[in-house]
Image (cartoon, rainbow, N blue to C red):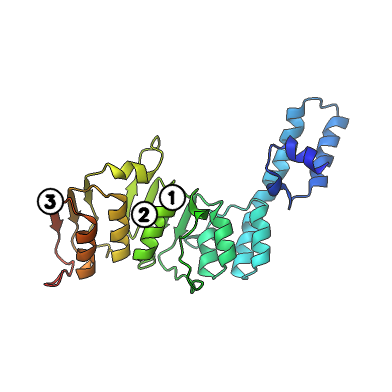
Amino acid sequence: TKHFVADLLDMKWEQMQEIDVYELHEVTKEAAKEGYTNQQKAKAEASERVHRLAQDAGPRLQAAILKCDAEGCLKEIKLGADVDMVHQGTSLCAWAARKGLWEVWYASAAYARHILFGPYSVVASRPAGGTLFAGHAFENVTRLTVDAYDLVGPTEARDIHEYCTRLKSLCVEGWVLDCPEHDYSLKVHCTLRTELSSPSNVHISVGTLTLMLLFCPKLSSLTIGNGNGIGSEGATAIAQHCQGLTSLSIGNGNGIGSEG
C-alpha cells in the first residue's frame, strides 16, 4: 500500500517515510467511493494534503531550531519544511548553523535554494576540522546572501567556489555577482568576465575579496571602491589571484599602507 501511494504521488520513497501514508491512501479510497474515476483527481487530492503538511512543517522547524531540538528538526525537514524560510533576517537553514546544529545544517542545505545569513549572524563554533560550506550538500544552492561581516574567510571562499556549483546569485557584504537566468551557473558565467568593480563604503573583508576574485579568474580590470578597508591582506589577495590585470584602481580609505 505504501509503495502504491508513493508511486501515485510521483515522490521519492525517502520523502514519504515521515508522512501518514495510511491517511493519504484513505484520500484516494474516498475519492473512488464518490465516483471519481480520474486518477489525476485522486492524485491532486493527495498531493494537496502533502503540500499542507509541508506548509505546517516550516513553523515547526523554526520552533525546533530555536529549541535546539535536532531530532525534531530532521523530522520536519523530511516532511518538506521550507528551509529557505526567513526568520529575523536569516534563513532557517542558516539558523541551524547559528545554533551549532551541524547535522541539521547539512541536511537542510541539501534542500536549500537560498541561504541567507543576516547582518548580526554569529555562527556557533564549528566542528573540529570542519568548515561552514565544505561538502557536496550545497551543490543545489542557487542564491547565497551573507550580510554578516567576516563570516566568509579565505577558507570559506574556496569552499563556496568549489562546492556551490549551481549558484546564480552571490551577495556577500553588499558586493553582488549574478548571471542571466539562461546561464547554467555563476561560475561558468564569471569565468569569461574581464572587468569587476566593487561598491564603496561596505567594508570588504579579505574573504569576500578572495571569493569574488576566485569567481572571476580572467580579470584584466579591477576597481575597488572608496572606504572598503581591504588592507594589506586584500592587496596580497589581488596580487595572488589577478595575474592578468592591466588596470587596477583602488579608492581612498582602503588602508593599503606601504606593505600593501
What is the number of the mark on residue 171? 2
Q: Which residue is mark 3?
A: 247
Q: Earlier in the sequence, mark 1 or mark 3?
A: 1
Residue visible at 71% across and 45% down in the picture: 13
Residue nearest the observer in this picture, 239 or 59 = 239
Q: Quadrant of residue 24?
A: top right
Q: Amino acid at mark 3?
A: Ser
Residue visible at 55% across and 53% down in the picture: 110
Taking 194 as reference, is 64 above or below it?
below
Alpha carbons under labels 2 and 3: distance apart:
24 Å
Q: Is residue 228 visible?
A: no
Image quadrant containing the C terminus: bottom left
Q: Is residue 186 visible?
A: yes
Q: Which residue is mark 1?
A: 143
Alpha carbons under labels 1 and 3: distance apart:
30 Å
Q: Residues within 10 Å of mark 3 (few under 14, many from 20)?
A: few
Q: Amino acid at mark 1?
A: Arg
Q: Are marks 2 and 1 in contact (CB under 8 Å)?
A: yes
